[in-house]
Amino acid sequence: MLEEKKYFYLLIIIPIAVLVFMLLQLWKRSAQRKFADKQLLERLSPEKSIFKPILKLTIWCLAIASLVVALVNPKIGTKLETVKREGVDIVFAVDVSKSMLAEDISPSRLDKAKRIVSEIINNLGSDRIGIIAYAGRAVPQLPITTDFSAAKMFLSNLNTDMLSSQGTAIDDAIRLAKTYYDDVEQTNRVLVIISDGEDHTGGAGKLAEEATKEGIKTYTIGVGTPKGGRIPIKRRGVTESYKRDLQGEVVITRLNEKTLKDIASEGNGEYIDGTVTEEAVEFIKNQLSVMDKTEFEAKKFSEYQDQFQWFLGLAIFLLLLDVFLLERKTAWLQKLNLFNEKGA
């Protein structure tokens, strides 16, 4: 666990120091060559060390890195304990088909879907969550967990290029979601499907009905507009063209509310219009608040201890070591020949 990650930016000092050192060495060599040749310089400064400036730079870089890590203050959990929590198991199935790139909802349907899920997570309490991505098929992204930070990380990585098989297989997403709920006694199970409703397979309603027999309540959130929009083809964030069909016509993708409403109805849930993020999030929040919470166990690290002192101590040791490393040769080091300078 890292307490102050913001201090990592200070590591930029290291490459800057290396660059300055290299430029300084080049300038010194150029100035020395103008003053005298190599043999004369060696006679004028016989005690000058070749390796110590590099060694001193290395020590300084390590000291800076140690100080930065000390500022970040890594912590280690010293005890793993089991805690009792009450909540609902929620699985989010997010549509990542190409139609989700349409920008009839700003900034795009997929970005809107990810924002809705992220805001729902922000309003959860002791619930557990899982994430599924689907297009032409469904793939697991995050199993049921209480780690909301990990969930947001996986959520942010969702994109329309992660699945090669295109389409919108909502039925496959429901089928996969049924395997997420591992507690046979857990009855508070919620599946939230976020999509534009362009189901290319059919059968999702029947599967949602079957899921209700396993205690799974299915909600659907529609992202998009009935008017629809074009699917942009972008390169480096710039729209170059729009997706076309086999006849060369620009494809217009539209929100299919009927499909999503039918799935929600069969799944003993409700359909939510995702146009206004706050309204969709508030609706899900209210639905979860009236559900019975089931107690479950979760393991977590506790009694975190600061570890900055080790890195601070290392930095101080390196800085003290640097005091004894002068750029010129010292008598006792020269006798020991630690840096093989006699051979050099």
Image (cartoon, rainbow, N blue to C red):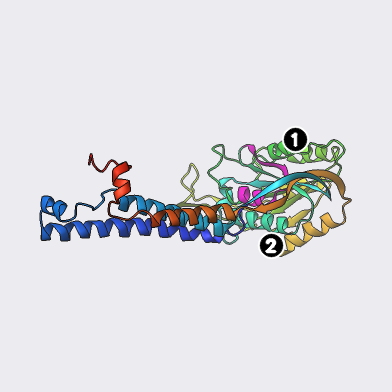
Amino acid type of the residue that numbered disc 1 sits on in the rendered structure: Thr
Where does the image place residue 307, in percent across and percent down from the top left?
61, 52
Distance between the alpha carbons at the discs numbered 1 and 2: 29 Å
Question: What label does residue 100 carry, if any?
Answer: none
Q: Which residue has dot 2 on it?
A: 277
Q: Can residue 238 be spotted in the picture?
A: no
Neighbourhood count class around disc 2 (C-alpha, 10 Å): few under 14, some 14–19, many 20 upward = some
Q: Is residue 160 magenta?
A: no
Amino acid type of the residue that numbered disc 2 sits on in the rendered structure: Thr
Give residue 342's quadrant in the image: top left
| Residue found 50% across the figure and 58% down from its top | 67
Give residue 208's quadrant in the image: top right
Going by the image, does 153 lie left or right of 30?
A: right
Looking at the image, how many numbered discs can be counted on the residues? Answer: 2
Q: Residue furthest right?
A: 292
Q: Nearer the viewer, residue 156 or 277?
A: 156
Name the element at disc 1.
loop
Question: What label does residue 179 carry, if any?
Answer: 1
The residue segment tinted magenta is 137-155
Neighbourhood count class around disc 1 (C-alpha, 10 Å): few under 14, some 14–19, many 20 upward = few
